[in-house]
Image: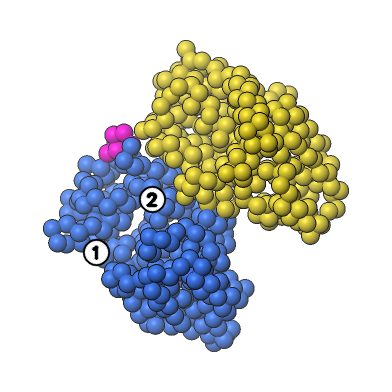
Chain colours: A yellow, B blue
Amino acid sequence: MGKLIDGKKISSDIREELKEKIAKLQEEKGVTPGLAVILVGDDPASQVYVRNKERACKETGIYSEVLRLPADTTEEQLFSYIDGYNKNDRIHGLLVQFPVPGHLSQQRIIDRIDPSKDVDGLSYVNAGKLASGAADGLVSCTPRGILELVKRTGTQIEGKHVVIIGRSNLVGKPVAQLFLNENATVTICHSRTKDLPAVTRTADILIVAIGRPHFVKADFVKDGAIVIDVGTSRFEGKLTGDCDTDTIIEKASYITPVPGGVGPMTITMLLDNTVRACMDHIG
Amino acid sequence: MGKLIDGKKISSDIREELKEKIAKLQEEKGVTPGLAVILVGDDPASQVYVRNKERACKETGIYSEVLRLPADTTEEQLFSYIDGYNKNDRIHGLLVQFPVPGHLSQQRIIDRIDPSKDVDGLSYVNAGKLASGAADGLVSCTPRGILELVKRTGTQIEGKHVVIIGRSNLVGKPVAQLFLNENATVTICHSRTKDLPAVTRTADILIVAIGRPHFVKADFVKDGAIVIDVGTSRFEGKLTGDCDTDTIIEKASYITPVPGGVGPMTITMLLDNTVRACMDHIG
């Protein structure tokens, strides 16, 4: 019988560690890490996410600004705000909350942000740094959260076989790079993979990020594997992961619940990225 | 009994195709693709590589320039030449031949090149575009050559299991991204991988890029697999690959010889990247 990985607890532990780091930064360098979030339009879900980020900053001691812009903001206007934040010394991390209205290009926006402030880690430069194993890039938050959850089980990652289902730019692909940099053997699967359960049964660590409720069953999982469930779908009115947790936990050594597994880590790693960006900035 | 993949023949076929493309570009758009190569110092091997690139350009109809700079060229001086080529409309592809003298940083040089002219595809921006599945990046030459060799066997790549041994930024990591973008299931192995032969025996397509002569034996290979040998080491005075070709060919459906497999493709894909960069430039 395996254990649940308590993402809420780990997230809260990391935030405590961050608080201490931030207090030390203020004391020793006189600097407070700062995060700016730009929200274009009034998507209700985005409003909630942005408020959660604001609150998390406040609780951890990170200075935060939220810039709310109307839905008809032009690219030129948005870029002039981004350029301003790029030069603003009080702001070490900058993100534009997605989705943005359809007349704006997500990738062009991301690549307008100074890579050293791109705390979502989604710019081509930061994706390239991650893919090249460079030490100084910013890595996107959910993949970093997943790595942290696995590390805090005490498992040695080097030499392990990590199998990832899903190859999105947000999760699957960067998480593959992260675990490769930790010296794991890494396999990336997706909808075109043949005999998926045969592949996933070779995994010491199985990461599932596809967004299909209960897609992964116990027969996908090797005895003693660690299973990280990144899925969050609404299913029969409930937030549901990609894994059949109740049966998998009989075989796995660890599995993340949904909710309360990977989810709470994402904002925490955003805070951590902001602190990193600040520390890199002051050198 | 498998077949050898004739890289020389395929390379020469592609160059013929390129000649036609270039002639058409000149006729219809009045534009000749141009490649500039900067060589710093007098490394004898680099001199040979650069001469081979010059000759290949000439034979294919690509305009080429070679700028030879002394070994004590400063970064500032080198950057001013790069900046000049970045603005030079006659030049669509630009590369600095590596290695450069120790006082210069390879990565800083690469990232100084306009990504749309970075025909070696090694800049963070192009690595990030490849990692993000963007259509408009330039991809490094050896990985592109490997993909082309596999494609020209007539094998359907989608759904195949591609196993790569080696995770360099030059070959292993970009080749993984390329085959992932072709809808293969991709596994990346390396020196820390446990029970490597057990993993490689699951490969429909096995790509070996580690630089250890005869490291891969027949028992690493599944019946009917395609094996791509990227290794080139000197062994007992001869150019030698990473694979025990004579025994593997009994099991594999195809294998590349060394020399005459992947090697001839690299400069060909550089020519192809230069033509692509030119076509993207004129739109």
Position of the N terminus of chain B, as image quadrant, is bottom left
Q: Going 33% across and 37% down the picture, which residue do you hit?
A: B192
Residue B133 in view (yes/no) = no
Position of the C terminus of chain B, as image quadrant, is bottom right
Residue B138 covered by magenta stretch? no
Residue A43 versus residue B151 in the image, above or below: above
Residue B29 in view (yes/no) = yes
Q: Secondary structure at mark 1?
A: loop
The disc label shown at residue B168, or none: 2
Compared across the picture, whether A120 is left or right of A70 comes to left
Task: Tell me the residue that label 1 is attached to.
Answer: B259
Q: Position of residue A149 (x, y in %)?
A: 53, 26
Give me the chain letter of mark 2: B
Where residue A260 sits, quadrant-wise, is: top right
Q: Position of residue B129 (x, y in %)?
A: 55, 55
Where residue B100 sits, quadrant-wise, is: bottom left
Dot 2 alpha-carbon crowd within 10 angstroms: few under 14, some 14 to 19, many 20 or more? some
**Nearest to the observer: residue B174 or residue A33:** A33
**Nearer the N terminus, badge 2 or badge 1?**
2
How many marks are shown on the rendered structure?
2
- State the extent of the magenta-drawn residues as a range: B193-198
Give me the chain letter of mark 1: B
Instruction: Spot the residue most to the left.
Output: B236
In the rendered structure, which amino acid carries the disc numbered 2? Answer: Ser
Residue B12 versus residue A135 in the image, above or below: below
